Amino acid sequence: MKTLPITFGIALFAIAMISATAFNDASAVSYDGTLTKFTSDGKYKIDMAWSPAGSLEPGVEYDFTFKISQGATDRAINFISFDLGVVENGILTSDNFVTSGTGAITRSLVFDNQGITHILLSNINHSDQEIDFTFSVGENPLGDGLMLNKKMSAEPQIYFCGWEKNKKTLKDCFETETYENYGWYGKVNVLIYAPGWNMEKDEIEWIGDTSDHPVTFHSRSENGFSEVSTACGLVETGTDTGLFMGRLKLTAHDYDMDGDGSDETGLGGIGCSSTSKSPYKELGKLESGRDGAFTVNWQYANDPEDKWVTKTATFHWNLGTINFLQDAYSVNDLIQFKYYDKDVYGMGKSKMALKFKVYSDSDSAGIDILGTQNGNHKFKKPYEFRITTEDASSGETLYALPGDKIYVEYDDHTLPEDPLGKIGGPYTKGDDRTIIAITTLVG
């Protein structure tokens, strides 16, 4: 007597419980004669087709082709393997290990009996995942041998697509996907891949915006614990995509970031920040701190048991940087420098009075350049000023002479902990450090 793998044994126990009304293959969908299913962890997508196409009859040889790809991206997997079993009316009639280096496997199968038949793929790529295609051979109580309902993946998957950028496809998301070192202020693009919740192919749908299946999120840091438990929701990126999008806004918290002796205004706050059903509106707002992490959860099922999918990422303060675009400038040049500090990115003058001190060997008092010069609160453009060798410094013009060093400095009041001292630390909250860049003025 043939010994069954344990996964087949479990499957056969389940098969014994199947009635004729259980033909509904709720995790498969047919496209042009191909059946598609996803493994329970969402990692693998399995396409199955057969030739000659059409309903299946006993005693006929069919060529079955199996293709395995990545569940979330549909990227082909070149090297695949699995145990291929056929169960006819509760009896295992075929059991073979198959493998291929081309991403697809074709095997000839003959079904000896009419009735309920299962094709089982187990040990997929040496994992514990198993797929069960169920259909009728010969007898056709369902009309065409298959009853296929809407596509259902198993467990949904959450992805964080990096900082600030809007990502509406998984391909774009994977280019910037990260779970470390987000800014404590700014937006995080969140995607949830859940094809099973793509119920209407011609409509843009929502998930997580109801109290029984909410999307929730929280953060924890030295500033405490922040949580939003209302159902904010994510919107489908387009019709029939099964990919849902929302932007989570990290709002920081009140803190003296420029050393003026007072906390800044307008920082912090939690909640669902928009009720407008647009993919470019925020999923919600969440407070954050100097060092910590945030988590997004979606309760996608509660019957017969609660099921959640969750993802976590960290945020930190960072050391700001200043760099002149050139090592040397002439007196007639437009002098430019670049600045970047993720900690104050996007805040603008309404949140803090960011400014740079610019001076020369010939004028130590120098001038101030505002961080909002030319609307540059996201630091995408260089800051700039000019030189005079005759008049006193004023406005955005600095007095300097050929041979002078020119300096730009900025006091960073949001320093990372840096426990190993890689950038001069360790620092405690409340420390500050002056960042200086230097260039030379030539004739």
Image: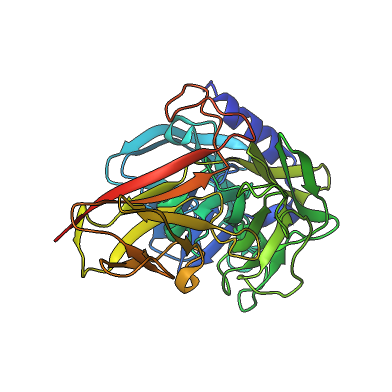
Can you say whether 369 is above or below 203 in the image?
above
Instruction: Give the residue at x 73% y 58%.
Output: 265
Describe residue 362's horizontal placement relative to residue 403 as left or right: right
What is the x, y in percent for residue 233?
A: 73, 62
Comparing 421 with 96, the one in front is: 421
Determine the image quadrant of residue 359: bottom left
Instruction: Give the residue at x 27% y 57%.
Output: 325
Comparing 429 with 15, the one in front is: 429
Q: Is residue 43 visible?
A: no
Q: Is residue 409 visible?
A: yes
Comparing 376 with 110, the one in front is: 376
Describe residue 250's horizontal placement relative to residue 398 as left or right: right
What is the x, y in percent for residue 287?
A: 72, 49
What is the x, y in percent for residue 47?
A: 45, 54
Describe residue 360's horizontal placement relative to residue 374 as left or right: left
- Farthest residue toward the left? 443
Instruction: Give the residue at x 72% y 52%.
Output: 286
Describe residue 176's horizontal placement relative to residue 142 as left or right: left
